[in-house]
Amino acid sequence: MLASTLLQVEDLHTQFFTSRGVVHAVDGVSFHVDAGETLGVVGESGCGKTMTALSILRLIPEPGRITSGRILFRGRDVTKMTDEEIRAFRGNDVAMIFQDPMTSLNPVTRIGRQIEEAMTAHERFTEQVARARVVELLKRVRVPAAESRVKDYPHQFSGGMRQRAMIAMGLSNEPDLLIADEPTTALDVTVQAQIIQLMKQLNRELGAAMMLITHNMALVASLCERIVVMYAGRIVEEGPVEQIFKSPQHPYTWSLLRSVPRVDEARKNRLVSIRGLPPDLISPPSGFKFHPRCPFVIDKCKSDPEPQLEEVAGAQIARCWVLMRNVKEDSLEAAKQSALSHEAAEKLKQASAAEMGGGASA
Ligand SMILES: Nc1ncnc2c1ncn2[C@@H]1O[C@H](COP(=O)(O)OP(=O)(O)O)[C@@H](O)[C@H]1O
Ligand code: SF4
Ligand SMILES: [Mg+2]
């Protein structure tokens, strides 16, 4: 492990033991986060991003648990920490910002008081110091008129302001690692842009490492240095953002990048979705899990065990028998044509959900 490595996740397995069977939510994931860097974790809904993050905090809900692997934070294994140690770890070293601030804020407690409580709960700051820091923190996340707004209740804050308050709370204990799980998904586009701007500024000012979980590739492009691409509980590609955006080697990454809305495309075609559905994580398809949806599939993908993550260029690694650089121009064109419109994909999803009568994958 390098001196600058803050977090090292090794072969993490997190499973849910349901009446339908075992859900392999996180299925052998390994990655690291260096001190001060911003790592993006991307992939469609249900691929295990949140469960990876919750595993790091040891907050996996029932009926789930970490079944194997190591999570080393500055060399100490989180999976082996005592209850007391894990509380101190959550309070001092790492903070998580969730998608929907309203569910994480207490509606009957004033915003300022909640941030204060977050600080004093871990006994790092006295109550007096905490109170003084609250206004400073709200100013830091650019909440206007912070002095008076500390006394507001969450419902008096707009969605964007609530997310700022959540970020302030996350920063209150000066964590070395900030995990933001879809921090802008619940917000409208203009507010999203403001929060992204804020996160960029904070990133520069604080020097804390950040793990940014999102399905928004544009957000990754503007904030991250490196990305990890997940599919069905596993990492399929990883590497420097610029390199991956320029030359994705895994067909799934390529498809994800194809689904980024582009301003130069006709409006009705703006959102292209990846054809088909993510696999059932209880009984996934044989061979490589992405094969039923992969436009470049070969026989080997269906029959052989999954390929290993291998270096494809510089610090970029990918798990694929074919790799995008070996795909012929004509199959590439055909694949582009076969991508479904967002609307069609949504219909397909709804039809399939109705057919399965709900199902476990969310
Ligand atoms: N409470 C639960 N019970 C059973 N399975 C669950 C539960 N929570 C999550 N999962 C499974 O874990 C998988 C990963 O979920 P999650 O990490 O939340 O995905 P993401 O954040 O990438 O959208 C999902 O596909 C889902 O099937
Ligand atoms: S291994 Fe096969 S199915 Fe998987 S991404 Fe590569 S080509 Fe597609
Ligand atoms: Mg999630």
Image: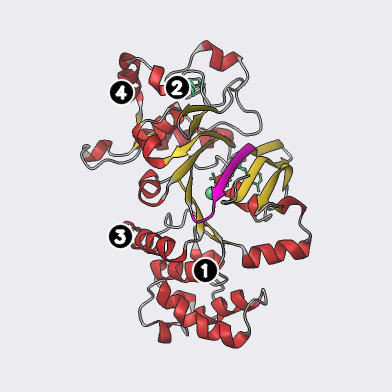
Badge 2 marks a residue whose secondary structure is: loop
| Other-residue count near label 2 (Cα within 10 Å), few / some / many at <14 / 14–19 / ≥20 | some
Three-letter amino acid code of the residue under disc 2 = Leu
Between discs 4 and 3, the one toward the N terminus: 3
Between discs 4 and 2, the one toward the N terminus: 2
Q: Which residue has dot 2 on it?
A: 323
Q: CB of residue at label 2: within 8 Å of ligand 2?
A: yes
The label on residue 171 is 1
CA distance separating discs 3 and 2:
37 Å
- Whether 238 is drawn above or below 324: the answer is below
Q: Which residue has dot 4 on it?
A: 337
Q: Residue at x 45, y 80 (%)?
A: 136
Q: Is residue 297 magenta?
A: no
- Quarter of the image with the C terminus is top right
- Residue 290, how many percent across, how many down? 52, 26
Q: Which residue has dot 3 on it?
A: 190
